[in-house]
Image: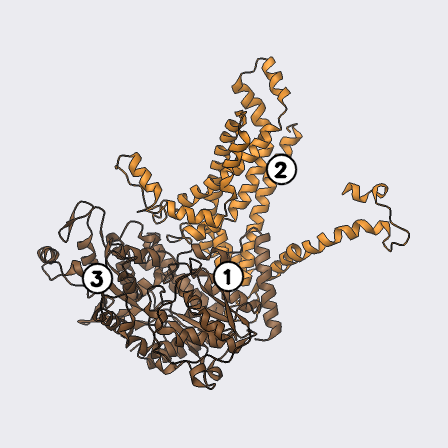
Amino acid sequence: MAALTSRRRLPRLGKASPIRPRYLPTLLVLPAFVVLLAITIFPLLFTATLTVLSWELTTNAPARFVALGNFATVLFEDSRFWNAMRNTAVLVVVGVGLQVILGTGLALLVNRVRRGRTLIVSLLLIPVMIAPVVAGFQFRMIYNDQSGPLNYLIGLLTGGLWHGTAWLADPSVALISILLADVWQWTPFMILIVLAGLQAIPEEIHEAALVDGATPRQQATHITLPLIVPVIVIGILVRMMDTFKLFDIVYQLTAGGPGSTTETIAYYTYLQGFKYFSLGYTAAMAFIQLAVITIVARVFLGYQKRTQNRGSL
Amino acid sequence: MAHSGRNRAAVGLIAIALGVTACGGSTGPSASTAASVSAPPAAASASAPAAAAPKTLDVVKWDSPPSFGNVTINVVGDAGQNLLPYQFWKDDFAKAGITTKVTEVPFDGVYEKLKTEFVAGTGAFDVVTFYPSYIGDFASNGYLEPLDSYMAKQPAAVWDPNQQDVLPVYRELYDKWAGKTYALTIDGDAHVMVYRNDLFTNPDEQAAYKAKYGTQLKPPETWADWLQVGAFFTRKSGEKLAGQTLDHDFYGSAEFAKRGFSYAWFVDRWSSSGQLYFDNKMTPQINTPEAVAALQNFVDSLKSAPPDVRAYGYDELKDALIKGNVAMVVQWTDVPKKGADPSVSSVVGKLAVGRVPGTNVGGQVIHRGAMPVGRVVAVAADSKNKDAAYWVAKHVAYDRSLEDVSTPLTGLDPYRTSQLGHPEAYTMFADKAGAQTYLDGLKVALADGFPEILIPGAAQYDDILDLHVSKALAGEETPQVALDTVAAEWNKITDNLGRDKQTQLWLSALAGYRSLGLIK
């Protein structure tokens, strides 16, 4: 942007050109701005307008102004909304937490590998490249109670003492099954992020620490980890926002059931919007989610800024 | 609907989709998810290798229309085997100058896909396939083309779908709204009980049952019997069943207990109490003591069902029976056809069809069975080729309908008198007598049929009922709490949609049910 706004670097326009140099930056930015306006800003503003309306497309009755009624209903009367938020919170906190722990551990291991690292990373990335809906279908087969490979392996490994469980039908484990599918798919993303952070650490810092007599453990806890924290924070933030929107796997595996044990906020929002066609109510739910994500993002970005100010990479 | 209203609604929908995305939500499933979603009466994917058309039967005499001149008719429906007729009869369509382009959507996603397209006025589809419980919504909002004038066109062999041949319950409830015909039935769904006749007639099993309960072993007459017989047949691997040692666990019964349509298996149990969804003032009747007892029966039945039954949809429930893992199920009427097909069934010749169990009311057992799903085809009001679209719909709904319902390749069930009168067409059965027994079972099932909610908002009422039935099955709520919540939520839906208007529509629907003898 700096280059664009510097008159000195602007291309020379011919005498016949009707475009005056000082308008050129604006003209260049305009297409992107129009696209942004059309697909982000306008829908956001329109959705904001919808939040104060009761608009039921099932009957096509005219929209009614309800002020903040939709927000009040969502927040204070809709137990299904809070159940969905609770399920989503479990997936975000536990699921992303596992992805960070496993991803960081595996990245540290892969970082030690000198030969064939690219191949290993490529193979590890396969789950990320699979469409979530395909991953969901795959896990439906894996979790099958009677013919799935998971229960078969459990039976084999326990010598027939335990034959597994009904992973998607047992209310006490269905959410964990969703969580494990998500962890399987997205841990490689954390590996990739952390590995990139590890490889950005200058070798000289470790060499200097070695000269000063630091043990490998001290190097890991006092040099490596502090230096990759900002990268991990970004990874967590991306994954948290993504997990907050978890839909495909839930749709594929359980449709929110048994009961409402796996109903996530994205799935519930989808039902309100595209099954019940309650536009105003859905818009209010979406805005509450936006507020939650924004607050979480602010906290993480603030933390990341503080760590950077302390001199991390 | 006025164009300006439709445009505003379309903008609203698009804004919601983008806005929800911007706000961190999700925009829902795409049509591409279709093939991987479990689909009641729609097991095999139509995108699978091309299935050969069934043998033509020439029972219906029909003529091809003059060529429409290479038009493409866009067809949409739930993914899987029930879209195969468009593949079977593509040569017929080609002869009429029509190419069909079929879009598959997930079974659970038909309403949202069609509603979204209708509201947005995209004109993406000419022929729409949907479940008749949505006809009130779609027809009253002007999304569908009235078909009466097309049906009356001459020559009759080209245009007349012979609606008098369609069983009244389907013709009047599925196809019509406010006295006009908006759709043509292609699938007459109803529930029947399907059971392992070989087990019920086995002398060892009969003796064991008599010794244990003091009564004769027979297919369950009531839902209380269902629990008892289910418990009796539930055996562990290594135990004996009909003289054979089991190499896997065997279960007395199974249910559709996955979210989506589990509510229909509750309605099976509740409807025989003689109650209805609402009273004349639109007050829900869904949480009466009889309804709570019915849901409790459903919950109790899971004790005799496979452990993963809460994940059972149509495919899983059908497979549990025809792969020989359970003794009895209540299912759609296409399942006996699948059970008679040796290429997919390991219980060929062992199945029988019976009435859905009932409830003892004043010393008399009343049998009722839900009629969930079903399928109709209609012409979209914004289709650019309405004549061609109508002919495509009429061709699958009448001209080739006997072939479509009598093949095990589809999940389509008989819905015409003529289809019930041609047992020789159902060649998957060992003989004509076997087919006749199947068709006789269907007639009884249809006589017991209990209607769905067929007014605008049906998708919402059904979804809420399904959610709380599922919660009761999962142990999240007691049956009483579950149904009290359903009643409260139904009231909210009614208020949201306009209580007066909904009451009027319900009273009109009731009159229809009564005139067809579906309610007494």
> What is the three-letter code of the residue carrying label 1?
Phe
The chain to which mark 3 is attached is B
Residue B23 location (% of width, % of height): 58, 52
Label 3 sits on residue: B349
In the rendered image, the vertical position of residue B179 relative to residue B50, given as above or below: below
Using the image, tell me which numbered label, if any, was put on residue A274: 1
Q: Secondary structure at mark 2?
A: helix
> What is the three-letter code of the residue carrying label 2?
Gly
Mark 1 burial class by Cα count in 10 Å: few <14, some 14-19, many 20+: many
Residue A231 location (% of width, % of height): 59, 34
In the rendered image, the vertical position of residue A224 relative to residue B35, given as above or below: above
Mark 2 burial class by Cα count in 10 Å: few <14, some 14-19, many 20+: few
Q: Are marks 1 and 3 on the same chain?
A: no
Query: For the residues carrying marks 2 and 3, which lies nearer the camera in this image?
Result: 3
Q: Secondary structure at mark 1?
A: helix
Query: For the residues carrying marks 1 and 3, which lies nearer the camera in this image?
Result: 3
Q: Colour of chain B?
A: brown
Pick out the residue farthest to the right: A15
Give the CA separation, mark 2 to mark 3: 70 Å
Work out which quarter of the rendered image holds the C terminus of chain A and state it: top right
Residue B346 location (% of width, % of height): 25, 55
Decide if residue B241 is on the left or right side of residue B290: left
Chain that is coloured orange in the picture: A
Decide if residue B71 is on the left or right side of residue B369: right
The chain to which mark 2 is attached is A
Q: Secondary structure at mark 3?
A: loop
Which color scheme did the rendering employ for the protein? by chain
Work out which quarter of the rendered image holds the N terminus of chain A and state it: top right
